[in-house]
Image: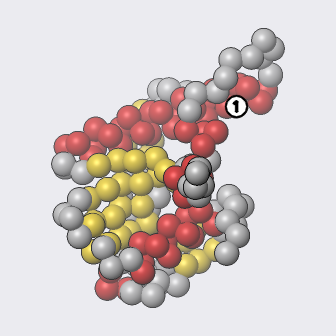
Amino acid sequence: MKYNNCAKGKYKVKYPKKYKGDASNVTYRSSWELGCMVYFDTNPDIMWWGSEEIVIPYRSPIDGKLHRYFPDFIVKTSKSDTIVFEVKPAIQSRPPKKRARITKKYLNEVKTWGINQAKWDAAVEYCADRQWKFQVITEDHLFKKNNK
């Protein structure tokens, strides 16, 4: 299967008893998310999983207001770890590079980074309070290449 960050659709859960939430209404917003769903659903080391099933409040650095963040996945492993995952393009997982000229594109990247950081800081705290882990995964994690 070719993965990109453009596909959208409904995922048909193969093992509904493993899914936390409404297994008949699972939506993916990228083929990267779809790949994660297939992995979580079919991996015997995953005890249960959910997609956008938890809500984490965060304060936006843009408008200063409280918003709701729905991380992509929550997963319980056979090692008793509970991990909350966010799937993002690598370019959105790090601060934008400073540029000589300030363009609309650059300002949008700064805004996206600021909002993502606020969400992820809130997620780290939320997870720490529950003794869970939080991780942002990118195409770098999903498509590791053998460097021999």
What secondary structure is found at the residue carrying circle 1? helix
Residue hosting label 1: 108
- Outermost residue on the front side: it is 148
Q: Position of residue 74 (x, y in %)?
A: 36, 61
- Other-residue count near label 1 (Cα within 10 Å), few / some / many at <14 / 14–19 / ≥20: few
Q: Residue at x 70, y 61 (%)?
A: 4
Q: Is residue 102 above or below residue 43?
A: above
Q: Locate residue 49, reporting x and y percent.
A: 35, 70
Position of 122 compared to 38: left or right? left
- Residue situated in front as seen by the camera: 133 or 54: 133
Where residue 41 sits, quadrant-wise, is bottom left
| Residue shown at the point (47%, 58%) measured from the top left | 72
3 up-or-down from 148: above or below? below
Left or right: 80 in relation to 67: left
Q: Residue at x 59, y 77 (%)?
A: 10
Q: Is residue 127 left or right of residue 12?
A: left
Q: Amino acid at mark 1?
A: Asn
